[in-house]
Amino acid sequence: MNFLTLLSLALAPGIAIGIYIYLKDHHEREPIALLLMSFFYGALSTVITLLISWPLTANVSIDPNSVTDQFLNAFFLVALVEEFSKFLFVRFILYNNKNFNEPFDGIVYALMVSMGFATLENVLYTFQYGVSTGILRMFTAVPAHATFGVLMGYFLGKAKFTHRREWLYALLALLVATLFHGAYDYFWFINYIPGVWVGAIASLIAGIILSKKAIKLHQTISPFNKGKGSY
């Protein structure tokens, strides 16, 4: 398999999902340059993830055959660290941008950051393990990261525009994304137990269903939607 084929396979799912969410922004689409910058922030968040993970993994011993240790690994050493790294860019940079002017923008920007992270990760895994891994991740890991981003963005949209309990919604944005990320990873980490991998697929399906509902809710509530409802 040549370089360009592997690269295309690795890039395709993240780009496709980014285009999908861009087209779902029915009322006032975000500047392309800012979306590309958001994607870059996501890739950059991997650096923060590594900086946090290195000292943690050096000082925390995880037994790969322990379901308890793998719970700690999935939810805290992986999910929380990765989602926190992405959260920093969305909450403290993009959140304050003048173009973040409706609740749905939280979903757009968090999704783009998440796709930047997932795409770089996908490139590394695909080039290391080959085309079969790239195809598997196209239907599992990358869509999973998309749902984490949508759910994070949903609550950040509420945080900015409900004008109350902003800190609580921001905290929920991080915690909900971490919860779904941790659950997805956990079942893969303990897949030495026969059939337990089904839990990862179930958590992915649940994330997709909730993400679709989150998208619809923020589309409806947009101040640019003439027939808008309310929270």
Image (cartoon, rainbow, N blue to C red):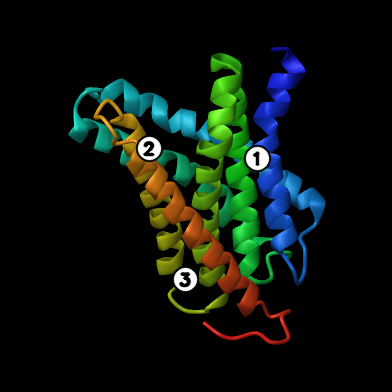
Q: Secondary structure at mark 2?
A: helix
Q: Nearer the viewer, residue 164 or 132?
A: 132
Q: Secondary structure at mark 1?
A: helix
Q: Which image quarter is the N terminus in? A: top right
Q: Which residue is mark 1?
A: 14
Q: Is residue 106 visible?
A: yes
Answer few, some or many: residues within 10 Å of disc 2's Cα (few below 14, many 20 plus, some between 14 and 19). Answer: many
Q: Earlier in the sequence, mark 3 or mark 2?
A: 3
Please tell me which residue is depicted at 40% across the width and 56% down the height of the picture: 176
Amino acid at the residue labelled 2 = Asp
Label 1, label 2: how far apart the Cα atoms are: 19 Å
Whole-percent x, y for residue 195 in the image: 29, 34
Please tell me which residue is depicted at 55% across the width and 62% down the height of the picture: 212
Please tell me which residue is depicted at 69% across the width and 87% down the height of the picture: 227
Q: Which residue is mark 2?
A: 185
Q: Earlier in the sequence, mark 3 or mark 1?
A: 1
Q: Nearer the viewer, residue 16 or 166?
A: 16
Q: Secondary structure at mark 3?
A: helix
Whole-percent x, y for residue 184 in the image: 39, 42
Label 3, label 1: how far apart the Cα atoms are: 30 Å
Whole-percent x, y for residue 164 in the image: 47, 79
The tally of labels here is: 3
Q: Which residue is mark 3?
A: 166
Q: Contact, CB < 8 Å: mark 3 with mark 2? A: no
Please tell me which residue is depicted at 33% across the width and 30% down the height of the picture: 189
Amino acid at the residue labelled 3 = Glu
**Which numbered disc, 3 or 2, marks the residue closer to the eye?**
2
Amino acid at the residue labelled 1 = Gly
Looking at the image, is 203 positioned above or below residue 13? Answer: below
